[in-house]
Image (tube, rainbow, N blue to C red):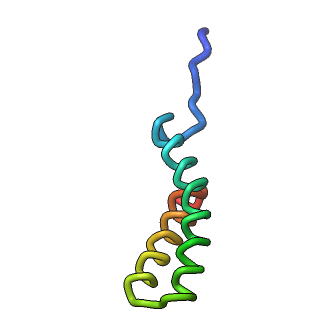
Amino acid sequence: MARRYFRKARFPGWLLTVKNAIGQFTLPLIVFQLIRTLLFPSAVDFFIILILLVLHFGIGHEYF
């Protein structure tokens, strides 16, 4: 009986690459946006930092 290949990953390889890239690139953007929000606060800055946080923790990590 031949052994079948069992893939452990739920996502295709290119999507895992995108997830890893989002996880790496969002953290410096979050720090920059946090400094900018503290210096020049506006409503748009809060939405941008919220979107970056959702991307970082929702997509960049294994929460879904």
Q: Residue at x 49, y 64 (%)?
A: 55
| Vertical comparison of 25 with 41: above or below | above
In the image, residue 51 lies at what x, y percent? Answer: 44, 72
Q: Work out whether 59 lies above or below 31.
A: above
What x and y, as percent, mark residue 21?
A: 54, 48
Which residue sits at x=46%, y=42%? Answer: 15
Does residue 4 appear to the left or right of 14 in the view shown? right
Front residue (pair 18, 35): 35
Query: In this view, which residue lies farthest toward the front?
Result: 39
The picture quadrant where one finds residue 23 is: bottom right
Residue 8 position within the rendered picture, expressed as x and y whole percent measured from the top left: 60, 36
Question: Residue 47 vs residue 5: left or right?
Answer: left
Count of labels in the image: 0
Identify the image quadrant of the N terminus: top right
* Residue toward you, 18 or 10: 18
Q: Residue at x 57, y 71 (%)?
A: 32
The structure residue drawn at horizontal position 55% and vertical position 88%, both measured from the top left corner, is 39
Residue sitting farthest toward the left: 44
Front-most of 25 and 56?
A: 25
Instruction: Decide: is 55 above or below 17.
Output: below
Up/down of 14 relative to 35, above or below: above
Residue 14, given in percent of the width and then of the height, sits at: 46, 36
